[in-house]
Image (spheres, rainbow, N blue to C red):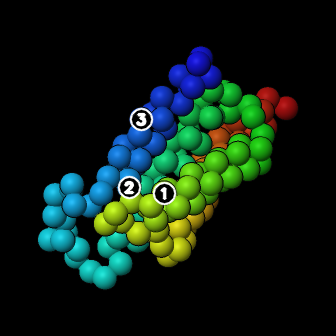
């Protein structure tokens, strides 16, 4: 239980995502007026999973004090979020007025990839900052 407390924002986001993705669309307000262009749904999927992956990356870094291997963290985050994305798409196949879509899964994975790239940039900046102090100490 204590382990999960380190990921409270990620878990809150997962609950919200599950609610949004698994509630039958008949029970939701009509959002067709927000379809600004074809593919709006894919951008929403991309954003949902970008935010999820970023939250997990940040909470993992905070939990470990930025000491955990970035590659180990990336493998854990990418695997867990891709599996979660696939499970939500599978679950949507079994809900009336919802449909699982391989293109939604692809958009989810692109969002996860973008978050991973952002994590690498942040991690690199952190490494550069920590090396600056040591270079002047020599």
**Residue 11: x percent and y percent?**
48, 35
Secondary structure at badge 1 equals helix
The kind of secondary structure element at disc 3 is helix
- Quadrant where the C terminus sits is top right
The residue lying at 19 percent from left, 65 percent from top is 31
The alpha-carbon separation of the residues under discs 3 and 1 comes to 19 Å
Label 2 – label 1 distance at C-alpha: 9 Å
Between label 3 and label 1, give the one nearer the viewer: 1
Name the N-terminal-most of marks 2 and 3: 3
Quarter occupied by residue 34: bottom left
Q: Quadrant of residue 115?
A: bottom right
Up the image or down, 12 lies above or below 114; here it is above
Label 2 with label 3: CB-CB less than 8 Å? no
The residue that mark 2 highlights is 21
- Residue carrying label 1: 91
Residue 135 left/right relative to 59: right
For label 1, the crowd category at 10 Å Cα-Cα, with few meaning under 14, some 14 to 19 and many 20 or more, is some
Q: Looking at this rendering, what residue extends furthest in the top direction?
A: 2
* Residue 30 vertical position relative to residue 101 in the rendered view, above or below: above
**Would you say the residues marked 2 and 1 are in contact, meaning their CB atoms lie under 8 Å apart?**
yes
Q: Which residue is mark 3?
A: 12
Query: Image point 14% across, 71% down: which residue?
Result: 33
């Amino acid at each position: 239980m204590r382990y999960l407390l380190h990921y409270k924002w990620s878990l809150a986001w997962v609950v919200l995502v599950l609610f949004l993705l698994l509630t039958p669309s008949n029970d939701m307000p009509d959002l067709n007026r927000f379809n600004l262009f074809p593919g709006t749904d894919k951008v929403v999927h991309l954003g949902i999973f970008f935010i999820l992956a970023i939250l997990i990356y940040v909470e993992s870094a905070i939990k470990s004090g930025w000491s955990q291997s970035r590659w180990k963290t990336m493998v854990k985050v990418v695997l867990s979020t891709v599996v979660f994305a696939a499970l939500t798409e599978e679950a949507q196949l079994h809900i009336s007025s919802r449909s699982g879509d391989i293109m939604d899964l692809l958009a989810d994975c692109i969002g996860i990839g973008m978050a991973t790239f952002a994590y690498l940039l942040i991690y690199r900046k952190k490494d550069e900052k920590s090396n600056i102090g040591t270079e002047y100490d020599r």
